[in-house]
Image (tube, rainbow, N blue to C red):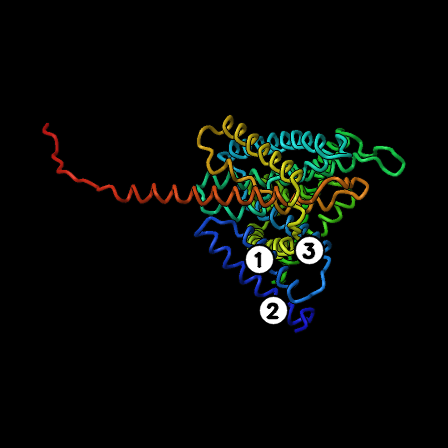
Amino acid sequence: MDFSSPYAIIIGSSVILILSFFFGEISKKTSIPSVLMLIITGVFVNLGLQALGVPNIDYSSILEILGIVGLIMIVLEAALELKLTRDKIAPITISFAIALVGLMLSIWITAEILQFFIEGMDALHAWLYATPLSILSSAIIIPSVSHLRGDKKEFHIYESTFSDILGIMVFYFLANKLPSADGVDHSGGLLGFGLTTLLTIVLSLIFSYVVILIFQKVKSDAKQFLLLSVLLLLYSLGKLMHLSSLIIILIFGLVIANMDLFFQGPLKKWLDKVKANEIYHGLHVVTLETAFVVRTFFFVIFGITIVFSSLLSWSVVGVSALCLIVIYVIRFIILRVSIGSDITPQLFIAPRGLITVLLFNAIPAKANIPAFSEGILLFVIIGTSLIMTFAMIADKKRAGKAIAKSQALSVADMKWKAPEL
């Protein structure tokens, strides 16, 4: 059979999507993240291709494109779920603070570990390599926490989204700090970074208003994918202009999900609420479906590209284990201080995934450190995913026992007599 034929590719892609759907259903019943099952599927696909003698394929460019599109879809999907009401101010603020402090502490201590153990690592390179290892994966977290209690689910959506956005901003700030060919730092420092971020926010708000006002006038039934194309275009142009492009996606999602908040005063008369709500609901469905497809193929291809021989090194195991310890010690301290004693399973829901792979592949060639093994990346991704899996399974069993115990208790009744006056 010719595995490069269009029909073979269509068959393979269809089977993978069908499996991904069932993995999602299995995940709901077992709490095993569907992403982990997709990665394992990719590993078996790779073994099958090798057994059949299929030549190796370079998936790096495909993985990068899927990662970028998947990142945009996941952040947009999360933003469409965020309702900016008064009662959400506290959880959003707490989630942002936890994401920011956790990210920066994790980057700092992980960078110290990398600089100490890996030859050729100076401080800047260590921080650059530590950043992808310190970002939570909303691609894994958001679809995995659907069964959790409302407030815990909400916390994870906010935290992982903020971690993605802040982590990407920190990564590209550090990447811009790398000396150019003339040996000069053209990043502009923290002031330049702050001004760029502020400019991005202002432009994002303007783009959001313009796009919503234009698209509420569009009568075509195919306008949802047209809207996604516009967002992808804005994201890509923002990257070329060295803006924090993910903020564009986040703010657009927040504006369209909270139109009553953003369209007030004179702006209110320009908004066709019925048409705008149609855009919101249609975009929500399309984003959800697109994120599912992109996430599926990204993690299957990632599984195909895994090289397990990179794990067969005591130095890799040692550095990776220290990185894992740092992740959970920092997380325990922050959650214990900010939330209290009820921190399970939140403590163990800290997987690394799509963002980690995407940013690691985005490290400039001039910043390449030959002594850094990709096995560290792989070890941390698999390790955090397995820890999350066991924690979710344990939490589901604990909840099941509590429900069974409450149902086993007998309900008594008694006669009631009205008091005499």
Q: Residues within 10 Å of mark 3 (few under 14, many from 20)?
A: few
- Mark nearer the N terminus (3 vs 2): 2
- Residue occupied by mark 3: 229
Q: Which mark is residue 402?
A: none
Which SS class for mark 1?
helix
- C-alpha gap between disc 3 and disc 2: 27 Å
Q: Residues within 10 Å of mark 2 (few under 14, many from 20)?
A: few
Query: In the figure, 266 relative to 48: above or below?
Result: above
What x and y, as percent, mark residue 21?
52, 59
- Residue occupied by mark 1: 41
The amino acid on which the numbered mark 3 sits, given as a three-letter code, is Ser
Q: Residue furthest bottom?
A: 1
The amino acid on which the numbered mark 2 sits, given as a three-letter code, is Ile
Foreground residue among 120 and 123 = 120
Foreground residue among 367 and 274 = 367
Tell me, yes or no, if residue 414 can be seen here: yes
Residue at horizontal 64 percent and vertical 45 percent from the top: 311
- Residue occupied by mark 2: 11
Residue at horizontal 71 percent and vertical 39 percent from the top: 200
The amino acid on which the numbered mark 1 sits, given as a three-letter code, is Thr
Q: Quadrant of the N terminus?
A: bottom right
Foreground residue among 215 and 336 = 336
Residue at horizontal 60 percent and vertical 38 percent from the top: 162
Residue at horizontal 34 percent and vertical 43 percent from the top: 401
Q: Foreground mark, 3 or 2?
A: 2
Q: Is residue 340 left or right of residue 250?
A: left
- Mark nearer the N terminus (2 vs 1): 2
Which SS class for mark 2?
helix
Q: For residue 355, what is the image quadrant?
A: top right
Query: In the figure, 354 relative to 7: above or below?
Result: above
Asked if disc 1 and disc 3 are in contact, CB closer than 8 Å, the reply is no
